[in-house]
Image (tube, rainbow, N blue to C red):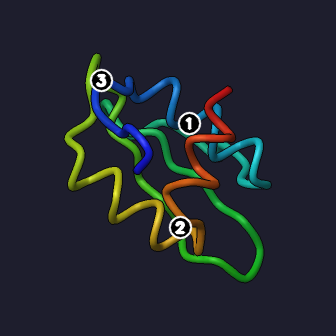
Amino acid sequence: MPKLANISGKEAVKAFKKSGYTHIHTSGDHAILQKAGYPTLSIPLHKEVARFLLKVQIKRAKLTEVEFVKLLK
C-alpha cells in the first residue's frame, strides 16, 4: 500500500502537474489546478496535507494511489 502521509501541498501540486494538470492560480493558501476533461482540483498549500483530502483529490484526478506515489518521485 502506498504511503500518503507527510506530503506537503507543494509536493502534491508537483505530482499533479506531472500528470498533466496546470497550476492556474493560487487562492488564499490553496493552489487551483485544471486539466481539460477533468474536474478542477484545489490543493491546500500546507506543510502536510490531510491524508483524506489527498485521497479525494487523487480520486477526482482519476489516478490510483500507486500512480500518485510514483508521480511524487
In this picture, is 45 found above or below 67? above
Distance from disc 2 to disc 1, alpha carbons, whole Å, reads 12 Å
Q: Mark 3: give few (<14), some (14-19) or many (20+) Cα within 10 Å.
A: few
Provide the residue designation for mark 2. Answer: 40
Label 2: state its secondary structure. loop
Q: Residue at x 56, y 41 (%)?
A: 69
Position of 36 with respect to 3 (left or right) is right
Label 3: state its secondary structure. loop
Of badges 2 and 3, nearer the viewer stands: 3
Distance from disc 1 to disc 3, alpha carbons, whole Å, reads 14 Å
Q: Residue at x 20, y 40 (%)?
A: 50
Which amino acid type corresponds to the residue marked 1 in the rendered image?
Val
Residue lying furthest top: 47
* Figure quadrant of residue 38: bottom right
Tag 1–tag 3 contact (CB < 8 Å): no
Along the viewing direction, whichever of 70 and 58 lies nearer the viewer: 70
Provide the residue designation for mark 1. Answer: 13
- Residue 14 location in percent, x, y? 64, 31
Which amino acid type corresponds to the residue marked 2 in the rendered image?
Thr
Closer to the chain start, of discs 2 and 1, is: 1
Provide the residue designation for mark 3. Answer: 6
Label 1: state its secondary structure. helix
- Residue 44 location in percent, x, y? 32, 38
Q: Which mark is residue 63?
A: none
- Residue 24 location in percent, x, y? 65, 47
* Figure quadrant of residue 28: top left
